[in-house]
Image: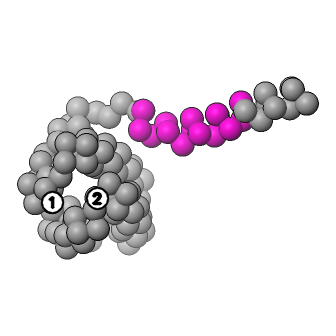
Amino acid sequence: MKQFTIVLAFLLCAVVGQAQVQYLKDKPAYIEKQADSLTQIYSKKLGLTPKQDLLFKTNIGDYLVLREEVEKKYKGTEKLNELYKVSKKESGSMSEVLTEQQFELYEKIKSSIQPIARL
């Protein structure tokens, strides 16, 4: 029974650790710079707190990496569809960082600040 508990605990830690890998990954300097720039723009418009600012920047950076991967991997309509999915996931992540009012404003201004690519 003790071995089973140890194995179960190890597996749970492995699963939780795997979910966090994206946040631990080093991002290229140009992604960090772009995330900084976008966060500053949003921060002015949304009135982010320092804690929100940090979480927002982390999310932006993570999704810039995903967006870049999609840009390299897909072409045409498939690329647009995948970029749209990444954008929706990003918005979902931001809903956990922002207040309801901030999120509503974020949704309104996002397309002008971070447009999805066009064909």
The colour scheme used to paint the residues is one colour
Asked which secondary structure carries label 2, the reply is loop
Asked whether the viewer can see residue 88, the reply is yes
Crowding near pointer 1: few (<14 within 10 Å), some, many (20+)?
Answer: some
| Residue nearer the viewer, 119 or 55 | 55
| Residue 50 image offset from top left, x and y in percent | 19, 42
Mark 2 / mark 1, whichever is N-terminal: 1
Mark seen at residue 68: none
| Residue type marked 2 | Leu
Asked whether residue 110 is drawn in magenta, I would say no
Which quadrant of the figure contains the C terminus? bottom left
Asked whether the viewer can see residue 118, the reply is no
| Residue type marked 1 | Leu
Residue pictured at 68% horizontal, 38% vertical: 12
Residue 98 drawn above or below residue 20: below
Distance in Å between CA atoms under marks 2 and 1: 9 Å
Asked which secondary structure carries label 1, the reply is helix
Q: Mark 2 points at which residue?
A: 98
| Residue nearer the viewer, 60 or 29 | 60
**Is 79 positioned to the left or the right of 57 in the image?**
right
Residue pictured at 41% horizontal, 38% vertical: 23
Residue pictured at 42% horizontal, 32% vertical: 24
| Residue 16 image offset from top left, x and y in percent | 59, 39
Which quadrant of the figure contains the N terminus? top right
Residue 31 drawn above or below residue 3: below
Residue 48 drawn above or below residue 33: below
Numbered range of the magenta stretch: 10-24
Q: Name the residue under label 1.
A: 46
| Residue nearer the viewer, 50 or 64 | 50
**Is 99 positioned to the left or the right of 23 in the image?**
left
Task: Look at the numbered discs 2 and 1 and tell me whether their residues touch, using CB distance below 8 Å.
Answer: yes
Crowding near pointer 2: few (<14 within 10 Å), some, many (20+)?
Answer: many
